[in-house]
Amino acid sequence: MDLSKLLVPASVRVMSQLTSKKRLFQELGEVAAQAYGLTAAIAIDGLQERESLGPTGVGNGIALPHARLENLDKITGLFIRLEKPLDYESVDRQPVDLIFALFAPKDSGVDHLKALALVSRTMRDPSVCAKLRANNDPAKIYAILTESRAPQAAA
């Protein structure tokens, strides 16, 4: 599995600033509706329900909100880069500016976990994050996220 299977160009956005996590989830719901035809309210509710279990801000300015939804036939992703970081109640208490959201079918089981692990590995790469933060063009950000990453050989 690679990120090109999870993202479409329309699911990548750059936004100047958002005022709250609630507003971020509303934006994610609207992007999910536009990019994938999901019902925005259902997407927002799913994200909020998952977030109530514990924050999905993983540190280093990165958040990985995710939800399992009814009537979804495949795992889909959204990416938002914020120009002004948002207080997200992350594990390291730092604001976030890179948000990669995932929506998975209710019964996706291990595939949802594999997709989350892939996103997490990608977002833990400091060089990828630096490139994402240096770009304002959603098309370039999409290319950065979806470029093939061969396993690194031992030197």
Image (cartoon, rainbow, N blue to C red):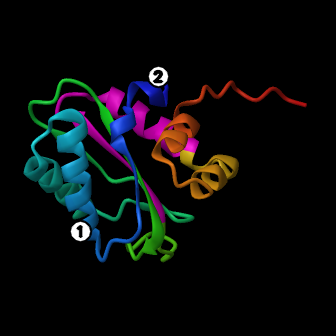
Of pointers 1 and 2, the one earlier in the residue sequence: 2
Magenta region includes residue 12:
no
135 horizontally vs 4: left or right: right
Write the start and end of the magenta stretch as one range: 97-122
The image quarter containing residue 56 is bottom left
Callout 2 amino acid: Met
Q: Nearer the viewer, residue 31 or 126?
A: 31
Q: Within 10 angstroms of label 1, few (less than 14), some, or many (20 or more) residues?
A: few
Circle 2: element type: loop
- Assign the C terminus to one quadrant of the image: top right
Q: Nearer the viewer, residue 85 or 62?
A: 85
Image spot of residue 82 (x, y percent): 44, 64
Measuring 55% from the left and 41% from the top, which residue is drawn there?
A: 140
50 horizontally vs 117: left or right: left
Vertical order, 18 against 102 (above or below) = below
Measuring 28% from the left and 64% from the top, which residue is drawn there?
A: 24
Magenta region includes residue 106:
yes
Q: Are marks 1 and 2 in contact (CB under 8 Å)?
A: no
Vertical order, 120 against 150 (above or below) = below
Image spot of residue 41 (x, y percent): 8, 52
| Circle count | 2
Callout 1 amino acid: Arg
Checking the image for residue 96, the label placed there is none
The residue labelled by disc 1 is 23
Circle 1: element type: helix
Depth check, mark 1 against mark 2: the one in front is 1
The residue labelled by disc 2 is 1
Residue 7 seen:
no
Measuring 22% from the left and 54% from the top, which residue is drawn there?
A: 47
Q: Within 10 angstroms of label 2, few (less than 14), some, or many (20 or more) residues?
A: few
